[in-house]
Image (cartoon, rainbow, N blue to C red):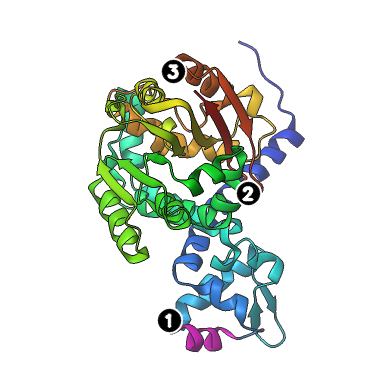
């Protein structure tokens, strides 16, 4: 038996790192509270104010606001003037924390912390016994994803993302058949349907709630060219043909991603295009060492994306399946003409333009 000599400087540095991790995790919960209560949005429009003034302006409980401000100030998120007891949110911080920031609003991600915490016991059991946690254990997930993706869609879909495919906007303007696979609540479909009234759009999703939400939004927006169908997208078989198909952060969640991609390929007309947005990253741990999003994405995968696939005896690709694996599966499905693009304002995704 040998005695290991500790590098005390390294040990102390790591202890500090762990303290920062725990502090950040709990602060993220407080960021979620600030987002959900609208406190960040209100503070961004107010000048320096006391906790009582903030409570009066928001209609929220002053004692809870005061304790929340304690976390926000010591975490260096909200600034504080000790002499007169006022607090304010700098504009530079509001750019990452308010609804007005659009896709720059990182506070929306904080809501996932409590959602995933609710299934920790089930995840621990999966570590011991295998299997997965079913989608039904995440009642708020689709709502949160719809909120997250809507920020990106509203800011970039029509003006930035679709132009990645040369000539697509002209074809959509003239009128083609398009579909979105794993459409969630259908916001992308409805944005495109509104912008291109001569084209027909179909959204496929297994969720009753998502399909109902898509239909309701289509009615509100007056989109008679948008339809939604509840469907297991692994059952796409080419019986209906499309000129253009999209999938936004949906493929890596699938139990049978190879079947889904093969079905998409079969459902495209000759010369058709599949546009797939999925998490940007490398397919190996080593390849993600310099990716600042990687730790968060591996955690999201463990607590949702991988486990919901495994719950269905699926492949369990996980959130960080990576660009190399994605291209491999796209090639296997039949797509040999694949290019990978980036969209300014979307730090999370790579965009795969796949031509048949």
Name the front one of labels 1 and 2. Answer: 1
Q: Could you tell me what secondary structure mostly forms the magenta stretch?
A: helix
Distance between mark 1 and mark 2 Cα atoms? 29 Å
Q: Around disc 2, counting alpha carbons within 10 Å, would you say few (fewer than 14), some (14 to 19), or many (20 or more)? A: few
Q: Secondary structure at mark 1?
A: loop
Q: Around disc 1, counting alpha carbons within 10 Å, would you say few (fewer than 14), some (14 to 19), or many (20 or more)? A: few
Q: Which residue is mark 2?
A: 20
Q: Which residue is mark 3?
A: 333
Quick check: 210 above or below 134?
below
Q: Which residues are magenta?
A: 50-60
Q: Quarter holding the N terminus?
A: top right
Disc tally is: 3
Q: Which residue is mark 1?
A: 61
On the picture, is 137 further left or further right than 51? left
Q: Residue at x 69, y 35 (%)?
A: 11
Q: Is residue 59 magenta?
A: yes
**Residue 47 screen position, x and y as percent:** 66, 84
Q: Residue at x 66, y 43 (%)?
A: 17
Q: Residue at x 72, y 40 (%)?
A: 13
Q: Quadrant of residue 119?
A: top left
Q: Residue at x 42, y 51 (%)?
A: 198
On the picture, is 60 further left or further right than 99? left
Disc on res. 270 = none
Query: Which residue lies most toward the top here?
Result: 1
Quick check: 255 above or below 84?
above
Q: Around disc 3, counting alpha carbons within 10 Å, would you say few (fewer than 14), some (14 to 19), or many (20 or more)? A: some
Q: Is residue 195 magenta?
A: no
Name the front one of labels 3 and 1. Answer: 3
């Amino acid at each position: 038996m040998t005695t290991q000599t500790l590098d005390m400087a390294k040990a102390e540095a790591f202890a500090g790192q762990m303290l920062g991790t725990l502090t950040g995790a709990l602060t993220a919960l407080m960021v979620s509270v600030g987002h959900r209560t609208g406190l960040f949005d209100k503070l961004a429009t107010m000048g320096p104010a006391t906790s009582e003034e903030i409570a009066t302006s928001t209609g929220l409980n002053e004692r809870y606001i005061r304790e929340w401000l304690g976390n926000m100030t010591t975490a260096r998120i909200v600034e504080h003037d000790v002499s007169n007891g006022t607090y304010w949110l700098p504009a530079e911080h509001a750019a990452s924390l308010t609804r007005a920031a659009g896709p720059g609003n990182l506070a929306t991600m904080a809501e996932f912390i409590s959602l995933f915490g609710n299934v920790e016991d089930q995840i621990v059991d999966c570590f011991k016994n295998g299997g997965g946690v079913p989608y039904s254990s995440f009642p708020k997930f689709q709502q949160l994803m719809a909120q997250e993706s809507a920020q990106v869609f509203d800011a970039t879909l029509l003006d930035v993302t679709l132009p990645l495919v040369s000539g697509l906007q002209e074809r959509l303007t003239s009128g083609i058949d398009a579909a979105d696979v794993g459409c969630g609540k259908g916001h992308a479909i409805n944005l495109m349907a509104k912008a291109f009234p001569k084209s027909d759009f179909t959204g496929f999703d297994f969720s009753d709630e998502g399909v109902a939400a898509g239909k309701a939004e289509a009615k509100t927006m007056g989109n008679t060219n948008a339809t939604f169908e509840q469907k297991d997208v692994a059952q796409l078989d080419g019986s209906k043909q499309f000129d253009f198909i999209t999938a936004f952060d949906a493929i890596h969640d699938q139990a049978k991603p190879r079947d889904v991609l093969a079905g998409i390929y079969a459902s495209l007309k000759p010369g058709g295009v599949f546009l797939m947005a999925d998490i940007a990253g490398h397919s190996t741990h080593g390849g993600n060492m310099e990716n600042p999003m990687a730790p968060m994405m591996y955690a999201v995968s463990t607590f949702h994306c991988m486990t919901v696939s495994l719950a269905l005896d699926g492949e369990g690709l996980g959130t960080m399946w990576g660009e190399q694996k994605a291209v491999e599966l796209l090639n296997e499905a039949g797509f040999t003409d694949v290019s990978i693009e980036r969209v300014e304002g979307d730090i999370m995704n790579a965009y795969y333009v796949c031509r048949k």
